[in-house]
Image: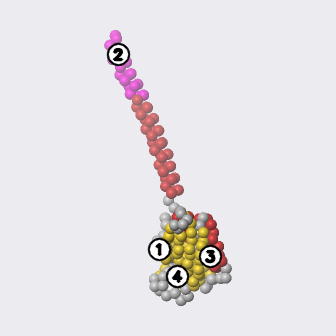
Amino acid sequence: MKTRILVIALPIASFIVSAIVAGIQVKRTFVAEGDRARLRASVEKLRIQVEPKDAPDEVLQVPTVAASESEQAAFLDELRSAAATAGIQLVKWNFVVKRGAKKGDGVTLEGSTPIECTLDVAGTYPSLRAFLYDLSKAERFYAIGNVSWKRDRDRYPNTTLSFTLTRFVNETANTTVASTRSGDTPGATG
C-alpha cells in the first residue's frame, strides 16, 4: 500500500515542484523583459537628449553687418563684454580698414569691407581660451590671425595674447545669414 501511494504521490509532487520552478522562471523572464524595455526606453531618451536636433556641427553666423556710425562702438561693447565674461583685460587695440582688399590679401567676403583690429589681451591661459571660444561662438563672423601667445614672466600665471581680429561690414543695409559647418570659412576666398 505504501508503494502505491508513493507511485501516485511522487509524480504528482514532481509535477507540482516543476510547475512551481517553471512559474518562478516565467516570472523572472517577465521581470527581465520589463527591465530590458525600461532600459531601452531610457537609453533612447538619453540618445535623443545627447544628439543635436540639427546637423551636429552647424553654426549660424552673420558674416557682415551694415556699416554705420555705431558699428564700431557695438563691436567694442561686444569685445568688452566677452573680456569681462572671461575675466581678461583688453590691453590695446588698433583698427585698420582694408579698402579694396584683393584676393590673396587674407580672408575676404564678397561685397564687404574687412576691418582688422589688432588686439593685445592679458589674463590666465584658461581665461584667454574662454575669450577666444566666446569669439568663435559669436553670432557675427570673425577671422582670427597673426596669433602670438606669450607668458608674462613678471606676473605668473598671466599670459599675453596678441592677434588680429577681422570683422566685415557691408555698405548695404541688408545682412545675410551664412550657414556653415565648423572648420569651413563662410564666403571666404583667397
Place residue 167 in its image quadrant: bottom right
Q: Name the residue rendered at 59%, 81% in the picture.
A: 95
Q: Secondary structure at mark 4?
A: strand
Q: Which residue is mark 1?
A: 184
Q: Is residue 15 left or right of residue 59?
A: left
Q: CA distance from mark 3 to mark 1?
A: 23 Å
Mark 2 and mark 1: span between their CA atoms?
85 Å
Residue 75 badge: 3
Spatial CA distance of label 3 from label 4 is 18 Å
The residue most toward the bottom is: 100
Q: Residues within 10 Å of mark 4 (few under 14, many from 20)?
A: many
Front disc: 3 or 1: 3
Residue at the image point whose x is 55% and y is 80% from the top: 116
Q: State the image quarter where residue 123 is shown.
A: bottom right
Q: Can I make out residue 177 in this image?
A: no
| Residue sitting nearer the eye, 10 or 175 | 175
> Which x, y percent locates residue 47?
49, 55
- Distance between the Cα atoms at labels 2 and 3? 98 Å
Task: Compare marks 2 and 4 and give the one earlier in the sequence.
Answer: 2
Marks 2 and 3, the one that precedes in the sequence = 2
Q: Residue at 47%, 38% (x, y): give it.
A: 31
Of mark 3 and mark 1, the one earlier in the sequence is 3
Identify the disc placed on residue 79: none
Disc 1 residue type (three-letter): Asp
Q: Determine which residue is flagged by label 2.
A: 6
Residue 109's label in the rendered image is 4
- Give the percent coordinates (x, y) of residue 112: 56, 84
Image coordinates for residue 129, horizontal then vertical, percent: 53, 66
**2 or 1: tag closer to the N-terminus:** 2
Q: Earlier in the sequence, mark 4 or mark 1?
A: 4
